[in-house]
Amino acid sequence: MTQALSIAEFCKQHSISRNLFYALKKQGLAPKTIHVGKRRLISTEAAAEWRKQMENQSNGGA
């Protein structure tokens, strides 16, 4: 079971481009990342939290 995703893996799993990921990051809307060595990873928990936030925004915060 994968505990963390690379940014490329996250983008692929969520059908978004890396450009969109970095645009979201610039706006403070990307999932939290962790720094492991020279890599930036996204934990499965952070990905789930991000999905929930995106769902809430899509549904008007409901």
Image (cartoon, rainbow, N blue to C red):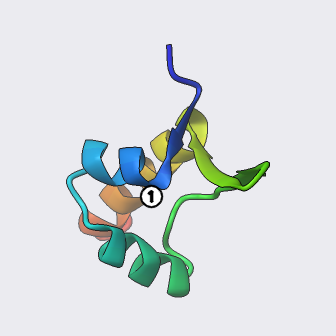
Indicate left or right for 35 with 1 as reference.
Answer: right
Q: Nearer the viewer, residue 56 or 48?
A: 48
Indicate left or right for 26 with 35 as reference.
Answer: left
Residue reaching furthest to the top: 1
How many marks are shown on the rendered structure?
1
Who's the residue at 41% across and 83% down the image? 23
Q: Residue 43 sits in which quadrant?
A: top right
Who's the residue at 38% across and 66% down the image? 61
Is residue 62 visible in the rendered structure shown here? no
Amino acid found under the numbered disc labelled 1:
Gln
Is residue 54 visible in the rendered structure shown here? yes
- Residue 19 image position (x, y, % from top left): 33, 77
Q: Vertically, is 16 above or below 10?
A: below
Q: Residue 28 sits in which quadrant?
A: bottom right
Label 1 Cα neighbours within 10 Å, binned few <14 / some 14-19 / many ≥20: some
Q: Nearer the viewer, residue 18 or 25?
A: 18
- Residue 32 image position (x, y, % from top left): 63, 58
Q: Locate the C terminus by quadrant.
A: bottom left
Q: Residue 3 sits in which quadrant?
A: top right
Q: Vertically, is 38 above or below 29?
A: above
Judged from the image, the secondary structure of the residue bearing numbered disc 1 is helix
Residue matched to label 1: 53
Residue reaching furthest to the front: 38
